[in-house]
């Protein structure tokens, strides 16, 4: 699709870009032209021109909602900055973990596909889509939900955190995973990438935290129940871990101590998707006994 180039289309004019390239050589703003073009649906096509100069492919997002445009540009900067220093960008490959907040225990994942643009100005671009998804899937809503979750993680103001989480849920509410999902994790050390990608798990946890912080425990526990219903196996393992680790009696811990996971799943999961919770692995019990031995070997 061809498009007119106006002041609205370009993130910055040529002079600004050149100024940045020469005087702020580390700033990805100066490495390419960033275009943002309205699509017939009212969403935006955010894309680059000029990355060949750095032996990188041009990149694009399609279907970007108006309030997500600046996040899309920011992700492009971060992907490009990382690519320029170390990460090759190839079609039909995955990119990961390059736009994470420090406290996240999941990687943000996306896949690069050849963009079906045949006009000469936008040929050979790569479209950033959700991890493992086809090029037609368009806007990577799971990726943006994870990206917003990272910002929510960093937000100190609980009202701001709440707003970001709600936006992430509007982008991607998450799926109800199989009953055993996440049962294998080791809480505290687990990589939650898969659960985040499929169920948007972190957003439910962050939203619950934001609501507890605003003294709205009933709403908070409703979102914890949503997280449990989506990832029952994880919830069982996580609950065992919390109850063993913490003695405190705040609303969060009281909820987990009292939570009837089976009942929550029966009530909150779509009809006919509930079943028995996964069996607890005997490993959990032996790990405790093994702890002193581990200290000896250290
Ligand atoms: Zn363009």
Image (cartoon, helix red, strand yellow):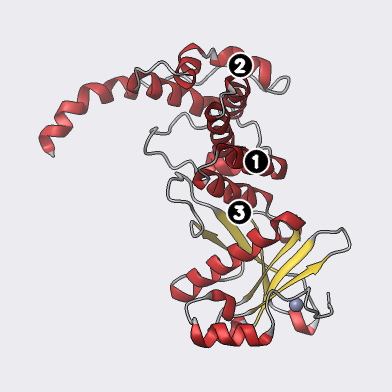
User: Between marks 2 and 1, how big is the CA–CA gap?
Assistant: 25 Å
Q: Tell me the quadrant of ligand 1.
A: bottom right
Q: Tag 1's secondary structure?
A: helix
Number of other residues with Cα within 10 Å of mark 3, as a class: few under 14, some 14 to 19, many 20 or more: some
Where residue 155 sits in the image (x, y, percent)?
53, 45
Q: Are marks 3 and 1 in contact (CB under 8 Å)?
A: no
Where residue 223 sits in the image (x, y, percent)?
61, 27
Residue carrying label 1: 163
Where residue 283 sits in the image (x, y, percent)?
33, 24
Counting residues from the N terminus, which is met first, the one under dot 3 or under dot 1?
3
Screen quadrant of the N terminus? bottom right
Residue carrying label 2: 264
User: Between marks 2 and 3, how big is the CA–CA gap?
Assistant: 30 Å
Counting residues from the N terminus, which is met first, the one under dot 2 or under dot 1?
1
Q: Are marks 2 and 1 in contact (CB under 8 Å)?
A: no
Does ligand 1 reach within 8 Å of label 1's beta carbon? no
Disc 3 vs disc 1: which is toward the camera? 1
Q: Is residue 253 left or right of residue 220?
A: left
Q: Residue at x 33, y 23 (%)?
A: 245
> In the rendered view, would you say 30 is above or below 127?
below
Residue carrying label 3: 131
């Amino acid at each position: 699709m061809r498009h007119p180039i106006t002041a609205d289309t370009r993130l910055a004019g040529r002079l600004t870009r050149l100024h940045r390239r020469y005087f702020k050589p580390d700033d990805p703003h100066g490495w390419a032209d960033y275009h943002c073009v309205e699509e017939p649906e009212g969403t935006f096509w955010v894309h680059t021109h000029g990355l060949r100069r750095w032996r990188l492919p041009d990149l694009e997002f399609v279907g970007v909602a108006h309030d997500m445009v600046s996040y899309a540009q920011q992700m492009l900067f971060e992907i490009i900055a990382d690519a320029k220093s170390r990460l090759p960008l190839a079609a039909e490959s995955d990119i990961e973990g390059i736009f994470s907040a420090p406290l996240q225990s999941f990687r943000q994942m996306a896949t690069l596909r050849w963009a079906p643009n045949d006009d000469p100005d936008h040929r050979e671009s790569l479209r950033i889509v959700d991890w493992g998804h086809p090029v037609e899937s368009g806007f990577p809503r799971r990726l943006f939900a994870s990206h917003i979750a990272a910002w929510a993680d960093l937000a100190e103001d609980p009202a701001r955190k709440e707003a970001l989480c709600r936006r992430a849920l509007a982008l991607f509410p998450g799926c109800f995973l199989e009953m055993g999902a996440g049962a294998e994790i080791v809480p505290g050390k687990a990589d939650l990438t898969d659960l985040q990608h499929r169920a948007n798990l972190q957003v439910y946890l962050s939203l619950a935290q934001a609501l507890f912080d605003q003294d709205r425990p009933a709403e908070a526990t409703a979102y914890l129940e949503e997280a449990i219903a989506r990832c029952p196996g994880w919830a069982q393992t996580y609950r065992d871990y919390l109850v063993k680790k913490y003695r405190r009696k705040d609303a969060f811990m009281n909820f987990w101590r009292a939570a009837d996971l089976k009942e929550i799943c029966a009530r909150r999961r779509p009809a006919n998707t509930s079943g028995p919770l996964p069996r607890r692995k005997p490993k959990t019990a032996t790990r405790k006994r093994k702890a002193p031995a581990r200290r000896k070997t250290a």
